[in-house]
Image (cartoon, grey):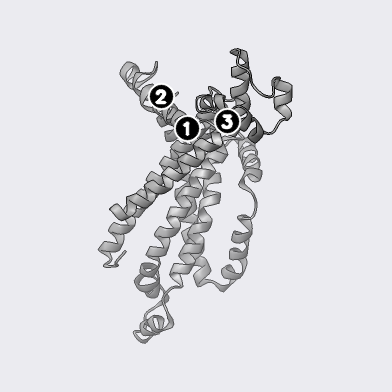
Amino acid sequence: MKQTFVPVLTVIAAIAAIWYIACVPMNIREVLTTAERAGAVVYPETAVERRDAGAIGMVFANTGELGASWSVERARLPAPHQVVVEMWDSTFGEELFGRRGIVRSGTLSNRGLFYHAGITLSATLLGFAIGAGLGVILAVGIVHSKAMDMSVMPWAIVSQTIPIIAIAPMIIVVLYSIGVQGILPKAIISAYLSFFPVVVGMVKGLRSPDHMQLDLLRTYNASKSQSFWMLRLPSSVPYLFTSMKIAMAASLVGAIVGELPTGAVRGLGARMLAGSYYGQTVQIWSALFMAALVAAGMVGLIGWLERRTLRRMGVQS
């Protein structure tokens, strides 16, 4: 346990230190503008001069004003503690004691991060189910059909070279034109991102048995179906779970991207979009961290299922 936590905490501390240092040049213009309005003498003296001046130079010329860099209300880069406070206020504070929170209404507030995370998670899970199912079916076909191997696999690879941010609006518009709205368009975008890792992992897993194992089954006169269920499929399970962890994270990214072009008002993507509209970068960062926590939780759940499954199969994980 100690060998795990110490490196993790060391990396987190290093990231936090770099983050705090980066806040100073990123927020220096807002800090100097506020200090100038309060009557302090800053360099350069005017906002026009500061607009064209270098951030690093202004930092060293105004060392006495740098303390405010970590408490700017609308910071370009909010400090880590500001993000933590925003997450607390927009989750526990809003969910429990907000105007529409649990204490007053008995339901989750539609302004809280838990509510928005739930909206995004529902699209993520549906997209993951579609993508993982499609990936397994394609992998089985690729392994057992030479034609599919030569025709489908190259297209699956090419499909991942297209930026999702470019095709997401087209998917939304096309589905909307035929009357498909709501969670399904976001789920399809999630499935688009999540099927590929499953295809690659399952193909690798289904082909992992060596020739000696396959020859042994042939000597027993086993059919292709028996070889699949008794050898190929059990051998692919570790590969499947590994690819599912990647697919789950990709599916969450797809759900968030799917919320951006629709102008949605619910979901973590909508939360980020609203933050960008109103210059609330701390809101964007808090939604980003909530997305990371959701992804970590889902990947952890898949890892737990993997350990239990492999233990029941008698495989050392």
Mark closest to the chain's N terminus, 2 or 3? 2
Taking depth in this image into account, of 180 and 163 the one nearest to the observer is 163
> Picture coordinates of residue 38 (x, y %)?
58, 13
Q: CA distance from mark 2 to mark 1?
A: 10 Å
User: Secondary structure beneath disc 1?
Assistant: helix
> Picture coordinates of residue 142 (x, y %)?
53, 68
| Position of residue 271 in the picture relative to residue 205 (left or right) | right
**Tag 2 near tag 1, CB within 8 Å:** no
Dot 1, how many residues are within 10 Å of its Cα: few (below 14), some (14-19), or many (20+)?
A: many
What amino acid type should be assigned to the residue bearing mark 3?
A: Leu
- Using the image, determine if residue 86 lies above or below residue 37: below
Q: Which residue is mark 1?
A: 286
Labels 2, 3: front one: 2
Which residue is drawn at the image coordinates 53% and 32% (left, top)? 284
Q: Residue furthest bottom?
A: 219
| Mark sitting on residue 273 | 3
Q: Which residue is mark 2?
A: 89
| Quadrant of image for the C terminus | bottom left
Q: CA distance from mark 3 to mark 1?
A: 12 Å
What amino acid type should be assigned to the residue bearing mark 2?
A: Asp
What amino acid type should be assigned to the residue bearing mark 1?
A: Ser
User: Secondary structure beneath disc 2?
Assistant: helix
Which residue is drawn at the image coordinates 52% and 41% (left, top)? 255
